[in-house]
Structures are given as structure tokens and as C-alpha cells.
Amino acid sequence: MMNKVLALTKVIFKNAFQNMETAKSTNERKNKKSKGMIILYVFVFVYLAGIIGVFSNGLIKELMEINQEQMFLGLILLAIAGFVLIQSIFSAINILYYSKDNEYILPLPIKPSQIVAAKTNVLLITEYFVVAIIGLIPLIIYGILTSANAFYYISMLIVLVAFPIIPVLISSLLVLIVMSFAKFTKNRNRFQLIATIFLLAIIFVASFTTSNTETTPEQMVQMVVQANGMVEIVRGAFPTLGMAIDSLTNVSLGNQILNLVLLAITTIVIYVIYIAIGQKLYLKGAVGNLFSGKKTKKKFNEKKAFGKSSLAKTYIGKEFKTLLRNPVFFMQCVLPAIIFPILIIGLTFVGINGEQNGVSTDISFMITNKTSVYLGIGILCAIQFFLMFIYISATAISRDGQNAVFMKYIPVPLMKQIDYKVMPNIVMTTFMNVLTIIMVEYLFKLPVIYILLITIAGIMMGILQSYISIIIDLKKPKLEWSSEYAVVKQNMNLIWPVILGMLNITVIIILSVILGKFVTSYILITMIAIVYLLLTIVVRNYIQKYINKLFEKIY
């Protein structure tokens, strides 16, 4: 059985990611650029690793000063669990049920348990790429700063391999349960969307419930006074988190080995239980998904089809419909931008636990002082962080696939089409911006003018990144894809919003450090907004000047 699972895993994985390589062109010009792109991606990885490393280094040193460095382990592992849990919800539905290989795999003489195991393995492999970035570098730095022994690094690798498995299994199990009802639906796309939102709601409720644990002041003082006592706050937030933390501490070698064994046994037991349940549930959802979803015939509305409408309204409406009617595009390009602000700020609100009135008074008072510049900068950096999860412009051309060539033939100027295509991204960034500001205002009761300036700066930042992202998609579009899932999960362009976001956060912080000593927060945020406006004009003029060259790869 194991050989079949491994063979099937290899086939599914290769099929899922073959489009990354099959896009190679016979054009020698493209082949020469491939080495340059590899160097560029290596540089990008080093850049992201550097930012994560600097942040980790600072945080660990701060915690070491109060003898609470183990809290860093808890925070990193909890971040891995949370990210994998949420991200795998989006991926599990597509890999398990909505991938086109199901049409070929299901009729084969393969047991459902083997299919579930293979597809879950592929899902897990995809999550390891993210875990390597957000987990490996911080834990290496932790080991260096705490002078950890050699066995720590062995334990670290084992933990990073074993710990993400249970979050993936939890998400996949929830998907198996919900998708077993797929045969009762008549609209596959709508069911996929509703199922994803329902599953995310379950995870959010569980997250809020876990984080809303009451700790008395006496208990908090005791944790702070005791060496590494604060780690107890997060230890129970996830089933195997305590084992993983203990596996990485330097208390004793025997204790580390024991916790590694317990972590491995727990993971294996849950994996076996998951496969047993998947054996019973998978075919119900998979077969139901293939043969359900009868399309209802809609009456042709002649007035609506041929009625007069403005070009902008029709074009932008088409872009919105593509995003909203396609569950994969909506879940991967739009939904994360709504989810992460609500989740992160919501957890912050729960943590404040009703004490925001006193805090808001202090912050409102601070804003009149020059030292308050860091508050507005912090809010802008938070907005920029959320912008990194919006991939609408970064896939604007790729989503059209081979139909993108029609942009060259329809009687609409190319620059005008670019403006229309970035509009959904601008609307989404503005919505996310306003949502973040509303939540911040609710928590801290900031002055109206201050909030207005931050909102304007955030909107300018979103517009700039919308145009930059579509340039990236024009320069390297993914026009050949077998499923919508490939556009957003097998598209290396999606790493660029993260790169731009990290770069922008760095620039914002540098500007605040340099200018914050000389100007007030109002002036600084206004200056940042003006900079974004000028850069947007420059970028848009660049597109207009080189529009024909940018469209060379659309054919």
C-alpha cells in the first residue's frame, strides 16, 4: 500500500506543478532569461530571510533580557500552526475535490484511503515551502543566540517536519466532512464557496475561544517572574504545541527525546485516524462533486444583453464577475484580504479584553507629541502587511488565460484596459484599508484628521501597488493553465506582492526614523501620502509609454 501511495503522491505532485516548467518557450530569448529569474528568486528568498532574521533577532534579544526566550518558540510554532491551518483550508478543497486529475484517478482500481493519503501528502509538501521560510530561519537564529547544542538543530528539523502535519490533517478532515454533502447541492461553485467560508468560520471561532483564556494579574506576575514562565500562555493553544516546545528546549537531552517521540507517536496516530475516516468519507464528496451541480437554464434577457451601458461599467463589471463567480479566484485573490485583518485585529481586540478606553486616552494624548509618529507608521505598516494578501492585480492578465490576446483586438485602448483591470484591486485595497481603520478607531478612538490622513496614505499605497502588480503580471503572464487553481497556486508572480510589501514596510520605517525627529506625525504621514501619489503617477506614465512592449508576451 505504501508504494502505491508514494507513487500516486509523485504523480499528483508532478501533475500539479508541471505547469511551472511546461511554460518554457522555444524562444531562445526566454531561455536566456531563465537563469536570471533563478538568480532573482534566490535574491528574493535571501531578502525575505533577512527581514525575518532581523525581526527574530530583535525579538529574541528582548525576551532574553527578561528570561522569557522560550516564548519565542511558542509564538513561532503557533504562527506556523495558524498559518498552515488557514492556508490548507483553501488548498485542501481544491487538491482533494476540485483538481481535474480526479476524473482519471477515481475510475482506477485504487482505494479511497490511498487517494486521500497521496493528496494529503501533496498538500503537506506545498505547506512545507512556507514553513521553511517562517519557521526555519527564526529557529536557527534562536539556536545561535541561546547557544543551543547540536541536538537542538536535529530536533528543530524533526519538529518542522512533524508539527505542521496535524494542522493539515485537521483542515483536511473538516473538508472531508463538509464535502461529503456535495452530492446534495445543485451548484458546485456556490457550494465550494459556502463550504470554505463555513470551515474558516469554524477555525476562527476555535481561535477566538482558545485565545480568550482568562489570566489573573497574580498568575501573570508569577509567569513573568518565573524564568520562561510566559510560554505557558500559548502552550495549550494547539494540541501538540507543548510537545514541540519541550522538544526544542535545553532542559535535558532525555526530556527532548521523550517529547520528540511523543510528538511523532501523536502525529502518526492522528494520521492513521484521519486516513480511516477519509476512507469512509472521500468517495461521497468526490463522486458527488463530479456528478452533481446541474446547471439551471437562465432565461435570455435581451434588454440586459443589448442594453446601453458605459464601457467602464461593463469592463470593470466583467472583472468583478470573474472574481466573484469563480470560487477559486475569489478564495485565493480576495478572501484572504478580508480574513487576515479580521482575524489579527480581532485577536488583538480579544487580548485587550475591554481595557481599550484607558489605552485610547493615552494614545490620543500621544498624537499631539512628536514621539507619536511611530503610531501612525505602525498602522501604515499593518495596512501594508494586509495588502500583501491581495492578488487581484498580480493575476489580472493570467486569469484570462489564452483569452487575454483579445485585449489587443477589441477597440479599447490598452492603457484604458489596464486602468479597468486594476480597479477591482484598488477597490479591494480601499475596502481592506477602511476596514482596518474602522477597527483601529474602535479600539483607540483616534482624532478624525489623523485617521483621515492615514486612510488617504493607505489608499495611495494600494493604488501604487495595484499598478506595479499588473506590470509584473504583464511581464511574466501565466496564460497556459489547466485549471483556475494553477493560476494562483502555480504562479510565481504571487510572491511579488509579498516582496513589495516587505520593501515598502522597510522604506516606511526608514523614513519614520530619519524624519520622525524633525516633523510631527501629521506632517510625516502627509509626506508619505504625497510620495505614494507621485510614484503612482510615475508608474502609470511608465505603463503608458511602454504599453506595446509590455503586451509583447500576450499572444
Image (cartoon, helix red, strand yellow):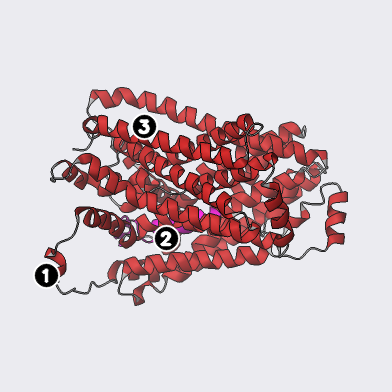
Q: Earlier in the sequence, mark 3 or mark 1?
A: 1
Q: Is residue 233 left or right of residue 139?
A: right
Is disc 2 placed on a helix, strand or loop?
A: helix
At horizontal 56% and vertical 36% (from top left) the residue drawn is 508
Magenta includes 91?
Answer: yes
Placement of 101 over or under 13, stated as above or below: below
Magenta span of residues: 84-109
The image shows residue 414 at horizontal and vertical percentages of 21, 40
Mark 1 closeness class: few <14, some 14–19, many ≥20 residues within 10 Å: few
Q: Earlier in the sequence, mark 2 or mark 3?
A: 2
Residue placed most toward the observer, 322 or 490 = 322
Residue placed most toward the observer, 329 or 354 = 354
Q: Main secondary structure of the magenta part?
A: helix
Whole-angstrom CA distance, mark 3 to mark 1, is 43 Å
Does the CB distance between marks 2 and 1 fall below 8 Å?
no
Q: Earlier in the sequence, mark 2 or mark 1?
A: 2
The image shows residue 415 at horizontal and vertical percentages of 24, 40
Q: What amino acid is at disc 3?
A: Val
Q: Is residue 29 left or right of residue 329?
A: left
Camera-nearest label, 3 or 1: 3
Q: What amino acid is at disc 1?
A: Glu
Q: Is residue 183 left or right of residue 146?
A: left
- Asked where in the image residue 221 lies, by quadrant, the reply is bottom right
Is disc 1 placed on a helix, strand or loop?
A: helix
Image quarter in which the C terminus is found: top left
| Residue that mark 1 sits on | 302
| Residue that mark 3 sits on | 538
Whole-angstrom CA distance, mark 2 to mark 1, is 37 Å
The image shows residue 484 at horizontal and vertical percentages of 31, 52
Q: What amino acid is at disc 2?
A: Ile
Camera-nearest label, 2 or 3: 3
- Asked where in the image residue 209 lies, by quadrant, the reply is bottom right
